[in-house]
Amino acid sequence: MKVIDIPVKSFTILLILCSQAFAQYSWPKSEIYKQNTIEKESGLLRSHLTGNFKKITDGRYFLKKSGKGDYSKFKDALWTLESETELRGGLLCPLYTICTIYDKDKKKIVTCKNEYDYKNGVIRITEKDADNATTKEIALPLKNRTTDYVSLIYFLKSFINDLIAGETVRFNFLSCEPGLYKLKARFIQEDTLLIGSQEIETVKVAITPDMGAFNIILDRFVPPTLLWYEKKEPHVWLKYEGLESGRNSTHIITIIEEIVPF
């Protein structure tokens, strides 16, 4: 078991939390959806997933995803992804994320929990095995505008109006390894997606590494992560193209097949 202690200075509390968005987004009370994921290279079906995003109190939301198929290094598995988020200064910021993987017989394999401690400026990451024994404990600094692989699509909705207006949004991303990365998001173009038998007008957003002077090179040679949101409010997320869970994971395409806004 490896523990990394992160010293926290008092001024990090002022780093707060999450900066105010330029044009605030109006959050729906609930979204329920089904999605399919394929491998981009082969086009083969990788998994099915259902999601439920809902308001639980004023300014606080809960997201649960339940999947079946292949996920990360796990084959023929079941999994749940849970995340509770809170509006802070107009941004939807994660409070915790839990990923639990089961085998096809519903026996737990591993659980990983990320806890976001805004008071002390720390992300605490804990992994437990099938017997609930702790196998990993890591602490990372909690920086301004941080999200993770579960809450990403909703985190960026805080900025959807700014992205449509042409603003570049910079943020920090916690991946599954775990690792913290500086990323930036920007609006690319309007696009039309076929969801079922319905053509839907969307806005397409690209996410790329944010490495300062190296951005010109990275933008040219590193494939972006792509997200599609419905053009009209409440800007429902419809499609994702990029890495599944972090660096060196499978390149996937995930698309909504059915969604029921509240």
Image (tube, helix red, strand yellow):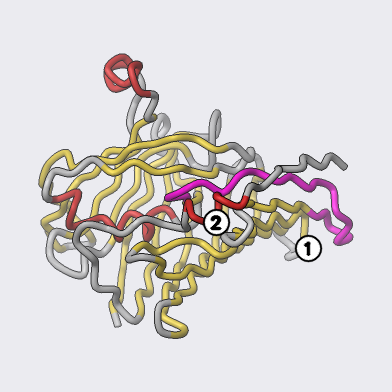
Q: Is residue 129 magenta?
A: yes
Assess whether residue 21 is covered by the magenta stretch. no
Q: Which residue is the site of mark 2? A: 13
Q: Quadrant of the N terminus?
A: top right
Q: Residue at x 45, y 76 (%)?
A: 60
Q: Is mark 1 on a helix, strand or loop?
A: loop
Residue 32 visible to the viewer: yes
The span picked out in magenta is 128-146
Give coordinates of residue 5: x percent, y percent.
77, 42
Residue 241 place in picture, x, y as percent: 35, 41
The residue lying at 41 percent from left, 55 percent from top is 36
- The amino acid beneath tag 2 is Ile
**Based on the displayed image, in which of its 4 quarters is residue 131 positioned?**
bottom right
CA separation in Å, label 2 and label 1: 40 Å
- Find residue 85 and report its horizontal and vertical position in percent: 48, 68
The crowd level at tag 1 (other Cα within 10 Å; few <14, some 14-19, many 20+) is few
Q: Say whether marks 2 and 1 touch (CB < 8 Å).
A: no
Q: Taking 262 as reference, is 35 left or right? A: right
From the viewer's side, name the closer residue of 37 and 136. 136
Residue at 15% from the left image edge and 54% from the top image edge = 202
Quadrant in the rendering for residue 172: top left
Q: In which quarter of the image is residue 89?
A: bottom left
Reply above or below: 137 against 87.
above
Residue ID at (47%, 49%): 146
- Residue 107 — which label? 1
Q: Is mark 2 on a helix, strand or loop?
A: helix
190 with respect to 109 (left or right): left
